[in-house]
Image (cartoon, grey):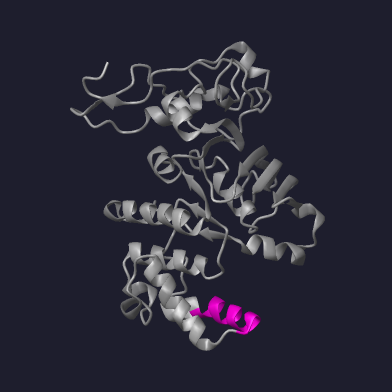
Amino acid sequence: MITGQGVTKTFRQKGNMLAGRAVPALRGVDFAIPKGGAASFIGESGSGKTTLGRIIAGLESHDSGEITIDGTAMSSLRPKQRQPYFRRIQLIHQDPYSALNPTRTVHQTLDAPLSLRAGQTGRSRAWADGRARELLELVGLDPGYVLPRYPHQLSGGMRQRVVIARALTVDPEMLVADEAVSMIDVSLRLGILALLKDLRERLGVSVLFITHDVATARYIGDDGELYVIYRGQVVERGHVETIISGPVHPYTQSLLSAIPVLHGLERPGEEAVTPTGALDESRADAGCLFAGRCPFRTARCDTERPVLGHDGGTPQEHACLHPAARDVVAVPAGRS
């Protein structure tokens, strides 16, 4: 179990007229990811979801709050003491083209961590070679073809499978997939998503999926929780199907309204929500963070910051002063 309580992170701008201005990336985020479970962080670019994923993977520090892994608070440990905990959490990068060293073959890429493990556990060199082949087969690749090749000799989908195999070399308990299919051909995306889902079922690893695509979040974690993040704040949280079938926060509704409709096969929701403007990080934070773009904004929204909760009797948690279920999701044509 990995949990977070009140996690915050602020960056300082550099290199322009606004240098030194504080930009909050996370504003007191809480989360819980059970062993073998699935969770998805969804939001537009700049929402803070990637920063949160990097913090969970131990690649980024946070300013305040607490990360707890299997009951141990990371703040109670020195940096070297945290390494064994974070090693169990592996990040699958968004870009398979830059995630692999172009000067190393796939065999060299997988051999480095496997040889280190072999030396630490007294295993033989043959074990490392055999394990590399096993992992490539596990992710759907032919070891004989892939091992001697360099990244530029592989397709994007094959590279991403190698990235996943590399993450599995340390037998992780969680995979953090950061937009893992966004830079792969559309025809290959389903295969990668199916692989991640299969690894979760076969190996029992937890999967944290970071995305801006509701459909992929639904596919990976149909039995897990969905966290909708806007400007570093979780604005809606609950079971994936609960939120997708009945969103109550206007931002979540706008994300679902933006999903393309298959004309002739589907009809759009009758109450589609469109934000009134673009993301503006310079807007004052006195009230609701979404107020400047919300079509249902009232004077109260400009002065009062809503907190995540079940106010209004909704099954999911939300951070909205005026929650309301709206018909925004497309349904098959002809369905009433």
Quarter of image, res 47: top right
* Residue at the farthest top position: 299
* Residue at the farthest bottom position: 125
**Where the C terminus falls, by quadrant?**
top left
Q: Is residue 111 above or below residue 249?
A: below
122 or 80: which is nearer to us? 122
Is 254 positioned to the left or the right of 158 in the image? right
Q: Can you see residue 72? A: yes
Instruction: Give percent across and percent down for residue 235.
Output: 58, 30
Residue at the (56%, 15%) spot, across then down: 322
Residue at the (68%, 61%) spot, across then down: 85
The secondary structure that dominates the magenta segment is helix
Magenta part of the chain = 111-122
Total marks shown come to 0
60 or 38: which is nearer to us? 38
300 or 166: which is nearer to us? 166
Q: Can you see residue 98? A: no
